[in-house]
Amino acid sequence: MQTEAIHEEQQIADERLRAAARPETVLLRQPIRALTPLQPAITLAPQATVREAIGAMQQAQTSCVLIVDHGQLVGVFTERDVVRTVAAPAHDLDRLCVQEVMQPDPDCLEMEDALGYALHHMIRGGYRHIPVVDDQRQPLALVSMPAIIAYLGEAFPQDILNLPPSPAHSIAPTREGA
């Protein structure tokens, strides 16, 4: 009986070692800093107007800006905030301060956090970007779900590019297919 338990424990340990050595597991344990180049953090003061925030997002071709007060991250303003809170009621975009509609105290990660941990946070929180900050909570960069997926895709191009075609998943005839 005891020999069986020891054998079973050894099998479990061996299985965990094999799983930890798989290439995809190793990649997901890489730190965020492995994503080079990281998307720079576009920052604005809390007193910036919503129009300024939208303009900054358009100019940087990004879907969010980080709101920083005295060098520390205090919120995130995203395109979802524009759609949910700004566009619904009639607001004066030149007078409405971004701090009134931003998401306060956002989840953050550090450069040494694992890519898998970043994906977990984004999936759990339902967002596509997460700020990367230093020890003083000063924004360093943004990490995005598409950047992590692209990183994984570059590591396994043969697995992705050699997928057989699927009629059920064909490309939409128009750009509105998403």
Image: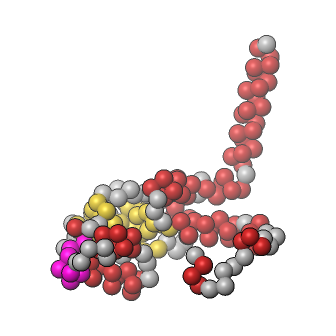
The reply to whether the magenta stretch includes residue 95 is: yes
Q: Main secondary structure of the magenta part?
A: loop
Q: Which quarter of the rendering shows the C terminus? A: bottom right
Q: Which residues are magenta?
A: 92-98
The colour mode here is: secondary structure
Q: Which quarter of the rendering shows the N terminus? A: top right
Q: Who's the residue at 48% across and 53% down the image?
A: 124
Q: Residue furthest top?
A: 1
Q: Is residue 129 above or below residue 124?
A: below
* Image-based side of 172 in relation to 95, left or right: right
The picture quadrant where one finds residue 102 is: bottom left
Residue 84 on image: x %, y %: 35, 69
Residue 151 on image: x %, y %: 62, 68
Depth order, front residue of 147/91: 91
The picture quadrant where one finds residue 105 is: bottom left
* Image-based side of 24 in relation to 83, left or right: right
Q: Who's the residue at 57% across and 65% down the image?
A: 148
Q: Who's the residue at 42% across and 75% down the image?
A: 63
* Image-based side of 56 in relation to 117, left or right: left
Depth order, front residue of 151/31: 151
Q: Who's the residue at 20% across and 76% down the image?
A: 96
Work out whether residue 136 can be spotted.
no
Residue 34 on image: x %, y %: 56, 65
Residue 4 on image: x %, y %: 80, 19
Q: So how many labels did they put on this image?
A: 0
The reply to whether the magenta stretch includes residue 107 is: no
Q: Is residue 135 above or below residue 77?
A: above
Work out whether residue 131 can be spotted.
yes
Q: Residue furthest front?
A: 89
* Image-based side of 139 in relation to 74, left or right: right
Depth order, front residue of 89/117: 89
Depth order, front residue of 7/95: 95
